[in-house]
Image (cartoon, rainbow, N blue to C red):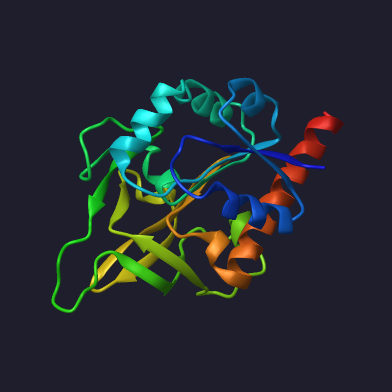
Amino acid sequence: MTQIAVIDYDMGNLHSACKGLEKAGATPKITDSAREIEKADAVVLPGVGSFDPAMQHLRSRNLEAPIKAAIDSQKPFLGICLGLQILFESSEEGKEPGLGIIAGKVRKFKSEPNLTIPQMGWNQLEFTQKNLPLWQDLSSNPYVYFVHSYYVEPTDVNISAAMTTHGSQRVTAAIARDNLMAVQFHPEKSSVNGLQILSNFVTLVNQTSSQKVLA
């Protein structure tokens, strides 16, 4: 059975993410142990809340190095919501430096007439990396569930895997580079489409694990 480490740093409802992964056929394990993260077949970094407390909690648990090591090891890695944002260098939400794994900054939505901030609810994705394994068996513009006031702005636009539009602002909704994938929306709250995305991630983990065994 595929074992996925779900990183615990006191930021968000980890059990929702775990239930989604279980439905997709994986065995998730909530942990803040560097050893467990290293042993896992894949890693999920969820998160709900604010940027600065997230980084403070990660550093207080000495999780910065294990997260970077997991990504460097080429095992599948999925960031969710705040777990996407903290991969970046900095955020307009706070003063703490981010993990700096992805070059770029987290920006706040600009105010517009009749625009609700945070974006809260269902919105469509526009795929920019159309052959990404995470998007297999989804419609071309699927609806997923968002809750956020800030969005990521990568320095390298080619790392964006999907975009979404809120008001007149077209922003990055997902990124992907090699084994690293991360999404701004909540797949665990996105019904059939979200479950498909998590299933696709688990399939990718199984394929990667099988290739390592064969090697």
Query: In this rendering, is residue 42 above or below 193?
Result: above
Q: Quadrant of the N terminus?
A: top right
Q: Residue furthest bottom?
A: 114
Left/right placement of residue 208 relative to residue 59 reads right
Q: Residue at x 31, y 41 (%)?
A: 51
Residue 174 visible within the image:
yes
Question: Residue 75, percent across and down?
Answer: 64, 34
Q: Residue at x 62, y 40 (%)?
A: 76
Q: Residue at x 28, y 30 (%)?
A: 97
Closer to us: 177 or 186? 186
Query: In this rendering, is residue 139 above or below 152?
Result: below
Residue 89 visible within the image:
no
Q: How many marks?
A: 0
Left/right placement of residue 153 relative to residue 34 reads left
Left/right placement of residue 161 relative to residue 70 reads left
Q: Residue at x 37, y 37 (%)?
A: 54
Task: Specify the quadrant of the image occupied by residue 173.
Answer: bottom left
Question: Residue 111, percent across and down?
Answer: 14, 66
Q: Quadrant of the C terminus?
A: top right
Q: Residue furthest right?
A: 214
Question: Residue 154, percent across and down?
Answer: 33, 46
Query: In this rendering, is residue 58 above or below 83?
Result: above
Question: Residue 21, percent across and down?
Answer: 67, 52
